[in-house]
Amino acid sequence: MGFGGISIWQLLIILAIVLVLFGTKRLRNIGSDLGGAFKGFKSAMKDEKKDESEKLEKADEKVIDGEAVREENKDNNK
């Protein structure tokens, strides 16, 4: 038994039908398009992490240490 009750012979028959319907050239194009999409997604995720870390580093440079002081308003003391 194979995946979920499907035997290896059933998988081979399905593969043969897909090859007949789409042809090897179209399947190769679909595979290369999917591969390119995954590669682009992966590089975009790496760039996003890089940009985020750069933003955090820049934000750390702009932080001003200080203490908040509350001033009482004279109009509220009536």
Image: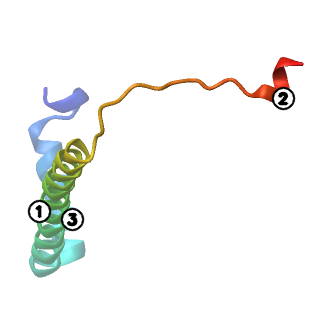
Q: Quadrant of the N terminus?
A: top left
Mark drawn on residue 77 = none
Residue at horizontal 13%, vertical 69%?
A: 36
- Which mark's residue is nearer the viewer, 3 or 1? 1
Image height check: is 77 above or below 55? above
Q: Earlier in the sequence, mark 1 or mark 2?
A: 1
Q: Secondary structure at mark 1?
A: helix
Q: Earlier in the sequence, mark 3 or mark 2?
A: 3
Residue 10 picture location, percent across and down: 18, 44
Disc 2 target residue: 75
Mark pair 3, 2: CA separation: 82 Å
Disc 1 target residue: 39
- Which mark's residue is nearer the viewer, 3 or 2? 2
Is residue 48 shown left or right of residue 24? right
Residue at horizontal 17%, vertical 79%?
A: 26
Residue at horizontal 12%, vertical 60%?
A: 43
Q: Are marks 3 and 2 in contact (CB under 8 Å)?
A: no
Residue 65 appears in which quarter of the rendering?
Answer: top left
* Disc 2 packing (10 Å; few <14; some 14–19; many ≥20): few
The residue most toward the top is 77
Q: Secondary structure at mark 2?
A: helix
Q: Amino acid at mark 1?
A: Lys
Q: Secondary structure at mark 3?
A: helix
Q: Nearer the viewer, residue 69 or 11?
A: 69
Q: Nearer the viewer, residue 61 or 65?
A: 65
Mark pair 1, 2: CA separation: 64 Å
Disc 3 target residue: 18
> What colouring method underlies this structural image?
rainbow
Image height check: is 3 above or below 46? above
Mark pair 3, 1: CA separation: 25 Å
Residue 3 picture location, percent across and down: 18, 31
